[in-house]
Amino acid sequence: MRAQALPTAVDSKRYLALSGGVGGAKLAAGLAQALPAESLVVAVNIGDDFEHLGLTICPDLDTVLYTLAGVVHPQQGWGRADESFGVLEELRRLDGDSWFSLGDRDIALHLLRRQLLAQGLSLSQVSAELAHRLGVTVTVLPVSDQPVRTTVHTDQGSLAFQDYFVRLRCEPVLRGLEFKGAAQARLAPALRELLASPELAGVIICPSNPYLSLAPMLAITELRESLRALRAPVLAVSPIVAGDAIKGPTAKIMRELGVQPHAGVIAELYADFVDAVIIDEADAELAGTDSRFVVAPTVMQTLDQKTTLARHCIALAEKLRS
Amino acid sequence: MRAQALPTAVDSKRYLALSGGVGGAKLAAGLAQALPAESLVVAVNIGDDFEHLGLTICPDLDTVLYTLAGVVHPQQGWGRADESFGVLEELRRLDGDSWFSLGDRDIALHLLRRQLLAQGLSLSQVSAELAHRLGVTVTVLPVSDQPVRTTVHTDQGSLAFQDYFVRLRCEPVLRGLEFKGAAQARLAPALRELLASPELAGVIICPSNPYLSLAPMLAITELRESLRALRAPVLAVSPIVAGDAIKGPTAKIMRELGVQPHAGVIAELYADFVDAVIIDEADAELAGTDSRFVVAPTVMQTLDQKTTLARHCIALAEKLRS
C-alpha cells in the first residue's frame, strides 16, 4: 500500500528527559549522542535557582547546557572548563559575597541571561537562546517559566537551597523539603505541548537526586498529573548504586529522611507513574523483587558509558510501547 | 583671651572638588595628598552613568575611586591596574554585548554596587560604601542621587553618551548636548549640606571636559545656583593647555561647537560663578587678558605634579577668601 512507503511516525518520535544537575546532565549527554537533536527535549529542575549579586543563577540548567555544549568542567561535572576567577577574587577583596563560586565565563552567561530576562523573554526563551549561543542543538528548557524555590528544613532551621547546598555543604540534618511556588507553577509551554503530543515516545527520569533535583519538578501538579495520565512509558534510572549515591548527598539525605538508600527506592517515590526503573548491575539481586526493575550498567564515566545507558533507556521505552 | 587658644575654624575648613573622570581624578588625587581626608569632598559627574548588561556603571565615580585607592590603570587613567578580561572574552564568544570594555575586577565592583542599590541604598550611600571597601578615606559622592543622563546630538543622530563616547569613539560630529534629568535632579544630601556650610573654604572645578563632564553637573539647577550664591571662592583649572586638551576629545568638541579651544574659555563658560581660573604656564601670555586668570603648572603626570597643582588651588582659595 502506498501509505506504507511514506516515512513512518517513528521518524518524529521524541523523548523527554527530566534532569537535575550533574548526574542528569551525564545521561542527557548520552541521549544527545543516541538521538537526533530534534528528538530530544531536556526539561530541567529550577528549584536550585536563586538570585545572587543581582544575577539569576540557574545551576541545573547551566550544568545541562555546559555538558551538552562540551564545555563543562570535566572533573567537577558542573561549571566551566578552563575557568578563571578574576571577578570572584576581587569580590573577596571587596568583602563582597564570595561563598558561591562563580567563574568569569559563568558570570558572562549569567549577565547575558539577566539581560535577556530584562528584555521580557521567559526563562524558556532565554534558555533556548543561551543554548543557541553555546552551540547546543538539543532543546533544553526549565520545567517551568515561573519560579520554584526549594527551601530546606533542617536541624539548623529553614534554609534557602543554596545556603544549605553550597554555603553549608549539606551539613545540616535534613528534616523536610518545601518547593515554594511549585503548586502554582505551570509547565513551560514547550514541555506542556510535548507531554500532550502523540510524538512523545517516552519520558526518561535521569539519575539526579530524587529529593533535591527531581522532587521540585514533580511537585509541579501539572507535571505529576501529566505523567500519571501519560500513554507513553515513563522510566527512571536509579541514582543509587549498591546502597550509595554515585555522587552528592542523595544517600545522606535519604538516611536523614528515614529512608534506607537502595536502588529500588525510586520505584516507591515514583510509584504513581513510573513504568520501569533501571537499576545498576551491582544491584542485580534486586531485579526479581519488582517487575518494573531492569538491570543495566548505570555508572557513567565515559561518553561511551553515557551513550550506552541512553540506548538502554530508548530500547526499554520502545519495548514498553510495543 | 582664652577663646583664642582654642583651635581656630581653619581646622574644620573643607574643600569641594567637582570632577569628571581621568583629568579630574588626577587633581582629586593631588588634593587628597594636600588635605586631610576629612577636609576633602569630591562630587563626581553622573552624566556618563548607564545601564549595561543589567549593571549600573558609573565611569567617572569609578575612575575617581580607583585613582584615590591607588588601583587605577596607570597608563589609561581609568579602569583597574592588573585587570583580567575573562568575562568579556566569554561574552564575546557568546555573541553578547562586548563593545564596552569591562574587566573582571571592574565587574566585581559593578556587581557589588548593583547589590547595594538593590538593598535600597542611594547612589551616595553606595559610593561611600564602595570607597570604604576600596580603602578610600576621602568623601567621594555622585553630584546627585537621581539619574542625569547625557544625550549627544550629532550628525549621526542623537546618541546615548556611551554610544557616542565608547562605541563610536567620539567620531560623530557633535551638534549639541542634552542632560536628561538634570533640571529635576536634587543635589546629593551631603553635597547640599557642604554647599550651605560655613566650613566650605572653596570649590575647585577640576580640569575635566567642560562639555561632557562638568556641564552635566552644572546643568543641575541647584548646583549652579548654589555656586552663584556662594560666599566661598570658586576656582577652575583649565583643561586646555596651549590650545589643545591634555587628553580626550575636549578640543575636538569645542571646534565642533564653534568654540576656539583656548585656555580662557572656562572663564566664559563659568562666568556666572567662577572667581579664578588657573591656566597653564604654556598659556602665560593670556594672563593679562582677564583678571581672573592665574598661571600655574597644570600638567599632571606624577603625583608630585598633582599635589603641587592641588597646593596652588588651595593657596589661591585662601588668597581669594582673605
Image (cartoon, coloured by chain):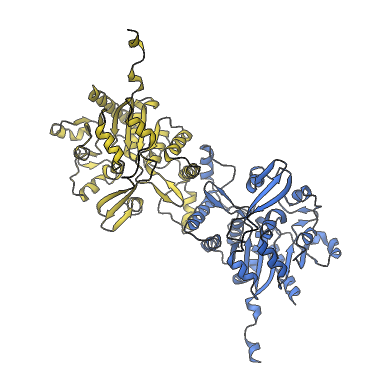
Chain colours: A blue, B yellow
| Residue B285 located left or right of residue A317 | left
Q: Nearer the viewer, residue A307 or A49?
A: A49
| Residue B240 located left or right of residue A107 | left
| Residue B197 located left or right of residue A157 | left
Q: Quadrant of the N terminus of chain A?
A: bottom right
- Write down the quadrant of residue A64 in the picture: bottom right
| Residue A32 located left or right of residue B228 | right
- Tell me which residue sits at (64%, 63%) in the image: A29
User: Where residue B321 appears, x then y in whole percent?
Assistant: 24, 24
- Tell me which residue sits at (17%, 32%) in the image: B284
Residue furthest to the left in view is: B289
Rendered view: B147 above or below A213: above
- Write down the quadrant of residue A193 in the picture: bottom right
User: Where residue A121 appears, x then y in whole percent?
Assistant: 50, 61
User: Where residue B299 appears, x then y in whole percent?
Assistant: 27, 35
User: Where residue B36 appears, x then y in whole percent?
Assistant: 38, 24
Q: Quadrant of the C terminus of chain A?
A: bottom right
Rendered view: A187 above or below B135: below
